[in-house]
Image (cartoon, grey):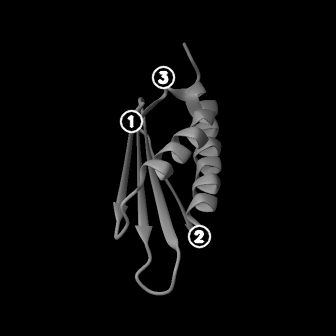
Amino acid sequence: MNLTVRGIRYNPSDETRAFLDKKLEKIHFADEYLQDLDIVITRETEGQGYHLDAKLHFTWGTIKMVSYDCYELFEGIELISDKIEATVRKEKGKIKEH
């Protein structure tokens, strides 16, 4: 699985990347199904908070998108990683091996 983390109006620190890697260990069961995972962290221009988008590319061509809005970045990373895991489990459940 190829993981890409980008920031818009935010530069992801090494601490943020390490926390994200730790939280995404939950989806290692789907490494052969998940081809690419692109995560974009956007700092809101008005007020405070972040918007997180994750684009999941599966090996069979399906692309899924999950997003989350939050005030605390690490809380948002935890919650979007849960959404990513749920999406991966759902898509994996739809595929039948031959």
**Vertical relation: 65 (above or below) 47:** above
| Circle nearer the viewer, 1 or 2 | 2
**Vertical relation: 10 (above or below) 81:** below
Which disc, if any, is residue 89? none
Which disc, if any, is residue 61? 1
- To which residue does mark 3 refer? 32
Residue found farthest to the bottom = 46
| Circle nearer the viewer, 3 or 2 | 2
Q: Measured from the top left, where is residue 37 in percent x and y?
A: 42, 42
Looking at numbered disc 1 in the image, what kind of residue is underneath it?
Answer: Gly
Q: Rounded to the nearest whole Å, what is the CA distance between mark 3 and mark 1?
A: 13 Å
Q: Measured from the top left, where is residue 86 in percent x and y?
A: 65, 44
Q: Nearer the viewer, residue 20 or 69?
A: 20
Sequence-first tag of 1 and 2: 1
Name which quarter of the figure residue 46 lies in: bottom left
Q: Rounded to the nearest whole Å, what is the CA distance between mark 3 and mark 2?
A: 30 Å
The quarter of the image holding the C terminus is: top right
| Circle nearer the viewer, 3 or 1 | 3
Picture residue at 63% right of the left edge, 39% below the top: 90
From where the camera sits, is residue 94 visible?
Answer: no
Mark 1 crowd level (few <14, some 14–19, many ≥20, 10 Å Cα): few
Looking at numbered disc 3 in the image, what kind of residue is underneath it?
Answer: Glu
- Whether residues under marks 3 and 2 lie with C-beta atoms below 8 angstroms apart, the answer is no
Picture residue at 50% right of the left edge, 26% below the top: 31
- To which residue does mark 2 refer? 70
